[in-house]
Amino acid sequence: MIRLTVALLFLFYFSTPTLSQEIQWEPIAPGVWKGSSGLPEAYDLWSAAKPATKLAALEKLGAEVFPLNQAEITGIQQDGNTYLRFPLERGEQIFGFGLNFKTVHQRGRILRLHVDHYGGTDNGRTHAPVPFYVSDRGYGVFVNSARYLDIYAGSASRLDSDDPPEARDRNTDATWTASPYSDAVEVLVPAAGVTVYVFAGPTPLEAVQRFNLFNGGGPLPPRWGLGFTQRVHRLYSQEEVIQEVNAFEERGFPLDFVGLEPGWQSKSYPNTFSWDPIRFPNPAELAQTLKEKGVGINLWINPYVSPDAPLYNRLQPYYGSHTVWAGAVPDLSMDRAQELYWEYFRREHLDIGVSGYKIDEVDGYDRWLWPDVATFPSGLAAEQLRQTYGLLVQNQSADLFRQQNRRTWGLVRASNGGGVSFPYVLYNDYYNHRDFITALINSGYSGLLWTPEARASETAEEWLRRFQTVVFSPMAMINAWASGTKPWTYPEVAEQVKAMALLRMQMIPYWYTSFAHYHFEGIPPFRGMNLEPGFHDLGATDATPGPLDLESNPYEEAIKREIKDQYMAGPSLLVAPFFAGETSRTVLLPKGNWYDFYDGRYVGNGEIIEVPAGPDQIPVFVREGSLIPLMEPRLHAPGPDERVDLEIRHYGREAATYWYYDDDGYSFDFEKGAYTWREFKVEKDGQGNWRGTVSAAPAGKPNTIGNVRWKFMSSGN
Amino acid sequence: MIRLTVALLFLFYFSTPTLSQEIQWEPIAPGVWKGSSGLPEAYDLWSAAKPATKLAALEKLGAEVFPLNQAEITGIQQDGNTYLRFPLERGEQIFGFGLNFKTVHQRGRILRLHVDHYGGTDNGRTHAPVPFYVSDRGYGVFVNSARYLDIYAGSASRLDSDDPPEARDRNTDATWTASPYSDAVEVLVPAAGVTVYVFAGPTPLEAVQRFNLFNGGGPLPPRWGLGFTQRVHRLYSQEEVIQEVNAFEERGFPLDFVGLEPGWQSKSYPNTFSWDPIRFPNPAELAQTLKEKGVGINLWINPYVSPDAPLYNRLQPYYGSHTVWAGAVPDLSMDRAQELYWEYFRREHLDIGVSGYKIDEVDGYDRWLWPDVATFPSGLAAEQLRQTYGLLVQNQSADLFRQQNRRTWGLVRASNGGGVSFPYVLYNDYYNHRDFITALINSGYSGLLWTPEARASETAEEWLRRFQTVVFSPMAMINAWASGTKPWTYPEVAEQVKAMALLRMQMIPYWYTSFAHYHFEGIPPFRGMNLEPGFHDLGATDATPGPLDLESNPYEEAIKREIKDQYMAGPSLLVAPFFAGETSRTVLLPKGNWYDFYDGRYVGNGEIIEVPAGPDQIPVFVREGSLIPLMEPRLHAPGPDERVDLEIRHYGREAATYWYYDDDGYSFDFEKGAYTWREFKVEKDGQGNWRGTVSAAPAGKPNTIGNVRWKFMSSGN
């Protein structure tokens, strides 16, 4: 009866329309404000991800004023839900909302953010539908909710708007449009309240940095995570795995970790998580053999527990009501469930040397995962677990490695806001090369990492093109076990593929420092052009492009179209991939001088250039005054504390400074200060010749720099 | 502070997991039970549709026992939502969930029922996502909620199920499946409670009848509604409309009402609802001229109000927060808003003779309609208005005509459960001929009417094929104003098209009686084969078809595949349309003898037949012992009380009885008893010759039957 009364009162409470209500903002770090509307839920994205905000780094970014008119941000409670409203200016463009595959510009879109396998349409159903957007006006907004959120990103118009669209007569007015002007982002949060964060810029990149630092900063991979990985056939035996690893070595093809697909287990879908006694009679021996070859082991799992799993019974009190492929779903939001679950992984996998996981099917489809009517012993809603299960498994599995003071670098199918710092790269079963690049771009707007893995190809050319982008991504992965394709399968391009693979290895010092920027400063290692200085300055982007004239005004055209086929990699590189079938492509260069990565010649400045396709190269361009540290080509990443010789390439006509990040490359000791930023400098000496210097290694700190050689790439150009 | 406390208590209340809870069932009519879980909302589908249950007709259908195990139907409140669960047996198949376009079998599907334009996928977003399903085991379930409902129609499996799927090893077990067996339909209702209805059979058709009668029974169209309609160019003037009507007459092509597209108004999108003074200087005169020609006027509208509309200001207090194409959205759930709104339509349209409306864009898309964060002065949620706006406009506009004691027959883009009795036919902008037929089939499972209108065609053959199905549908409509196609546009098929159009007119007596069965008994005039006696008896349908062998067992194959290209029309006809490009097709005949509609020859019994395609005919088959009443071919439907001669065709080898419905064909006097069911009988006389008789006309009742001629179609066969 009391329950009845309470529910009745609740209904009454929410059936009364509420007036627009300004949100009160509280600064929680320089340039970061927290606000709430209604009564936020106890469980949100942060409850699952538990990030540790990098306060010192935020302080270093400095103070800013609140970037929006606070009176224009409102939240009301209505119908048991919370309706949020954020202003948009005319001509403003926004980016983000997670791992979109087809669109970069998000203004005008309607999304229902819902963790799921990507289904071919940017509708909010994706592996990581992060409720964060960044504006080209230089601010960001994060809605910290573990609910399915309905986003109207500038699609709806209010009758009482200060800047309403004009009613037009469709009968006879040629300017009539089906999408009238909208001046706000609106969000439906299906909960009685929510916490929201606003991040200042002043640039869009700084807003993204603040979002990333607020969520703990990016992960710092072990150096081996930046090498090559190959996934082997799901039913390979221990012996066959070793043969495959040997084949890589014999062909001089790099390999840092090998991925075992479901068949390493005695049963899968649902899983036992225990080694199959026939295929893997001695997993510890396997791990040891591979370790001696400099190769780690990554294990495929999905989290669903087979009734035949050794850990099945002890988890009984912690299962959700519904099954996934007849496997039980552990409620990993509960401490005790976590302990019992991961303890088994630690003992059976980590303790024998497994270096990481590929965590599959924590995203969708709806017909596979638990339905939204499932119940869980924690009392959390099925929806909340769906939105955060990817966060939970990342957080908890990463913790296993941290407890052993070694870093991991793995794969996961789902993530969400709050998961910035996890050492996991997203992947999926979709396989459109162009869309993979768009996803790579979008990953940078939302604190995500994404791999455009190479799986299968119809032609040698496609294999090459896909491979080239794999090399310029967070994880250089071949996941071709189903098709049986090996890196050297296509003889026509085997040479080029191998050269690219070795280039990836040479660049590990550059990648490693790029990730250090992600970790310490929140700068995404892979990101879209719209975050680049010199790009937005070209002019305002526009949600409704005016009449374009490429002949008379290519400039205007260039900045108004959505750029989703070129991206930035690390501090200095602009990557413009080719797709199979292309004989040439255009590249938009932001303002400033740009140079060819391979030969150092000047290519342009704030303009569109045409680049012919060749088999040997993926077009890469270097910003004026950049230094790129490379090491020798090799088959494995440097081991813990291993010292390597560097070739430092200088590009351009100007003096350059580069801060090189260094630590042991393996443990978490960097978190206790065991790291250095070494200064690399190139200047002209008295004779007008370029000269490079490296700052001294601080005493008592890791130092992996061997001999340094300088190469002045643009000197002859 | 009280609000805070209440909300907190609420959160506490719903965060406690609740055990499965049986629903208490209350019989509300013979074979109809009402149950509720939690606290149902005040506003549901019935609040908008306000149907008048046909209790007497339900009583006539008779008593039945509750068709399911009540203990297996549960509802719990969790997370502020209601989770419903209904059992499914092995091998059971279910149908319904509204206007699906691609699928008939719904078991295994996941749908989010959401009123919207159909987007090409059966995912619950459709013009009429009715929360009702019927089982081939002979019962139906209706969830009376005006919310977006998540339906798991036998896709999810519970850990504690009595009949759980077996865990299998994907590594090596070839029988592993991605979709394990599920034994329940589960529904997430985003509200603290909901009312549910269960309908007994014992046949699936009877369950549908009960659902329809419970919702007021089907609409009885005016006789003119069953004639032909043509929609004219959106910018036609009054004079051009008359010319078009004349053209139909001159070519001897039937026409009962003409549809005016948006340009009849002074402004559209948003709308003024007032006649354009230039294009339509004298609408009353136009209506009178057309009336004299036997042609009515149907006006296109969508409900969104232009600031320039004469009624704009007086509706000010009743608008929702958001606009649609910069037009205001009247909250038509409010009595006062309804009155002010429709009063204008009555005065400006009905009073000069307008006979109906085409009500557009009450369905979607999301980017057009109000967002779910919109608020309305009634306090209803945007979602609730989205789910019921189609019901509201149908109910309220139909009422205008009822007040004038004349029936209407119109078009609408959205409907929902509860709307069975409205005199509106659904249409859309999608245009796949095959899918149009599947929609026609599905309309019959959910108390809907659907028109497979002919709009444009790439070839003469396509035009013919589309036209043939238009003739065998609830509204014979040509909506080709945009393409400019006229019925006679393709000379190669003009003859056949005209013959089909005249056949439609001849069949008005048959259609009219078919609709009377819909109105009085709830039998859908257009329906799928799975509702047919002699179809299901062929054997059990199966959600997971076994290995099929068409050679050795065509029978088994026939009943296991989804039949979505043939349907029943009225009591006796089986229609099997051709689609452009086909040279022949198969037709599945249920058990019992079947005869060719055109020549009366026997075609088969409980078997698959092959039918060759010809230009003249759409294959139509008649059940053993059927009588089909036809009238002479003519250009307009009979007027009020007009007497017409009948040709009554007898098919088959058996004696036959047919109940012919009669009334004035125009007013609502039939609701006060001014109608008759006349008995037509065919029997063999002493000499073994067929003899037909018609029962006498009851005194003081309408009688539109003139001379009767008998035709014994199968006598020579």
Image: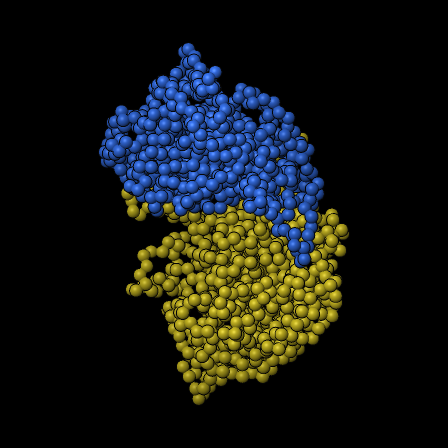
Chain colours: A yellow, B blue
Please tell me whether residue A139 is drawn above or below residue A74 in the rendered image: below
Taking the spot 26% from the left edge, 33% from the top edge, the residue there is B251
Q: Residue furthest bottom?
A: A687
Q: x%, y% of residue B52?
A: 50, 24
Q: Quadrant of residue A610?
A: bottom left
| In the image: residue B63, left or right of residue B301 | right
Q: x%, y% of residue B449?
A: 45, 33
Please tell me whether residue A150 is drawn above or below residue A593 in the rendered image: above
Taking the spot 67% from the left edge, 75% from the top edge, the residue there is A293
In the picture, which quadrant includes the N terminus of chain A? Answer: top right
Q: x%, y% of residue A209?
A: 52, 62
Question: Between residues A156 and B524, which one lies in front from this camera angle?
Answer: B524
| In the image: residue B202, left or right of residue B410 | right
Question: Between residues B138 and B708, which one lies in front from this camera angle?
Answer: B708
- How many numbered markers are drawn? 0
Please tell me whether residue B193 is drawn above or below residue A29 in the rendered image: above
In the picture, which quadrant includes the C terminus of chain A? Answer: bottom left
Question: Between residues A696 and A404, which one lies in front from this camera angle?
Answer: A404
| In the image: residue B267, left or right of residue A581 | left
The answer to whether residue A60 is visible is no
Please tell me whether residue A695 is drawn above or below residue B553 in the rendered image: below
Taking the spot 48% from the left edge, 16% from the top edge, the residue there is B686
The answer to whether residue B62 is visible is yes
Question: Between residues B449 and B696, which one lies in front from this camera angle?
Answer: B696
Q: Quadrant of residue A127?
A: bottom right
Taking the spot 47% from the left edge, 38% from the top edge, the residue there is B566
Q: Residue furthest top?
A: B699
Q: x%, y% of residue A174?
A: 29, 47
